[in-house]
Amino acid sequence: MNKPMVAGAAIVVLGGLGLWYYLEGGTPHPATAVTSDISVMPPDASAIVHPVPAAEGAPPDMEHSDAELLTALPAAVGAGAVQDFLEHDNMIRRLVVTVDNIPRQKIPVDRRPVRRVGSAFHVEGDELHATLDPANFDRYKPYVTVVRNLDVPSFMKVYERFYPLLQRSYENLGYPKGYFNDRLVEAIDSLLATPQVDGPIELVRPNVMYEFADPTLESKPAGQKLMLRMGPDNAAAVKAKLTELRAALTAAPPH
């Protein structure tokens, strides 16, 4: 079962959210092209729903944004998390692509902002009747701890400072009239809408990767399927921080 990781709910990595979005320990799906689905296109920028306040001073330069982010992010997520968990190149692009794809069916693993967990994926039973092994939940705990400890006010300062670069990257992704912060809020809402499943989660293995046996669960967006795989306690902790982050992201009055 492929496990992309939490964020930009993780930027949700920018803020730590992204930090849990690529915990997959199994063989990854091949990288997929980032395409636009007209049914989920963000609103026109002329009708921004959740504007981001302008930060003081000139925005960072895209060419040097990786180095500047690596300097700025420790205040929000801690130096250890930045050093150990984040990919350190093309960070803006990775974050934007990940956030945009959280509500979709797949997240391109070659664009992930967070390093992959090395431990193996475990199931209970056999290939004829398998269920998700609760022992897998422990693999997510270091990342969920980062999310839980995210300092939202500090994150918002970083987010607002780098927002012009995030917006530019989002437009270059194929949304010239879209607004990145609105898409981030949509991604968070998708994660918060993850259903709670009581009891063991049954799996099937039609090919290399395990999938949810319940077609309703398997059809869920990639972000929601990750939330289900990380276990109810971890998911509850992530949802609590996402709720706090969403309130900060939507605090400015609409235009």
Image: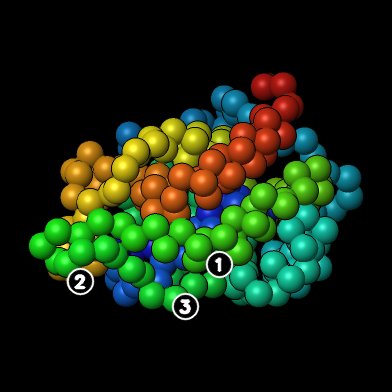
Residue at 17 percent of width and 63 percent of height: 205
Alpha carbon of mark 1 to alpha carbon of mark 3: how far?
A: 12 Å
Q: Earlier in the sequence, mark 2 or mark 1?
A: 1
On the image, numbered disc 3 is attached to which residue?
118
Residue 40 x %, y %: 38, 36
Q: Farthest residue toward the right? A: 57
Residue 171 x %, y %: 54, 49
Q: Earlier in the sequence, mark 2 or mark 3?
A: 3
On the image, numbered disc 1 is attached to which residue?
114
Front residue (pair 9, 128): 128
Amino acid carrying mark 3 in the image = Gly
Q: Quadrant of the N terminus?
A: bottom left
Single out the mark in the foreground, 1 or 3.
3
On the image, numbered disc 2 is attached to which residue?
208
Q: Quadrant of residue 132?
A: bottom left
Give the image's coloring scheme: rainbow
Amino acid carrying mark 2 in the image = Val
Confirm or deny contact between disc 2 and disc 1 (CB under 8 A).
no
Front residue (pair 56, 113): 113
Residue 234 badge: none
